[in-house]
Amino acid sequence: MSEQALSGLADAFNEALAEGRLTIQSCNNCGKPNMWPRYRCPYCQSADLGWRDADGAGTLVSYSVVRAVPPNGFEDQLPYALGVIRLAEGVQLLARLEGEGEHGFDAYECDAPVRFSPHPADEMRERPVAWFRLESEAGT
Ligand SMILES: [Zn+2]
């Protein structure tokens, strides 16, 4: 399978991020959600897949704060945090965590309630990734 074909799988997800929405690929046949996007449903093998908006609520399963030795292109992002988020819909994704709260990244802990945080369209087109923040700091 070519890299070009694979890259198209996430186009709808990335475009929704640029519109301020978090979406989940879902099967139109059996109704189950998929994360990450696929060409066929892993449960019923249907190719009839669509997208639906996620609620945006989730739980932080695990996370890591990168404070040194960033990969190429992330030098200006330090420190930054990546987390595994389990969405209310039951699927998990890797996401960035915001660190602007009162206690920064120290405020995060496993099993903490988190919420999707939309970022500007130009930022999402340059580096598409879902951002989350602590539920207790959402809207601040
Ligand atoms: Zn299915």
Image (cartoon, rainbow, N blue to C red):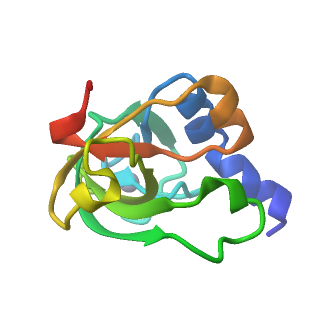
**Can you give x and y, in whole percent of width and height, for residue 83 in the image?**
38, 63
Q: Tell me residue 18's x, y (percent).
A: 60, 28
| Residue 26 visible in the displayed image | no
Q: Residue 72, image x and y in percent?
A: 77, 68
- Work out which residue is located at the far bottom of the displayed protein and give it: 69
Total marks shown come to 0
Is 58 placed above or below 41 here?
above
Q: Along the horizontal axis of the image, is 33 left or right of 12?
A: left
Would residue 2 appear left or right of 36 to someone viewing this image?
right
Going 40% across and 46% down the picture, which residue do you hit?
98
Near-viewer residue (2 or 48): 2
Tell me where residue 23 appears, x and y as whole percent: 44, 37
Name the quadrant containing residue 1. Answer: bottom right
Q: Nearer the viewer, residue 135 or 44?
A: 135
Q: In the figure, is residue 106 to the left or right of 5?
A: left
- Looking at the rendering, the quadrant in which ligand 1 lies is bottom left
The image quadrant where one finds the C terminus is top left
- Nearer to us in this view, 16 or 29: 16
Q: Residue at x 54, y 33 (%)?
A: 17
Name the residue at 22% across, 56% down.
107
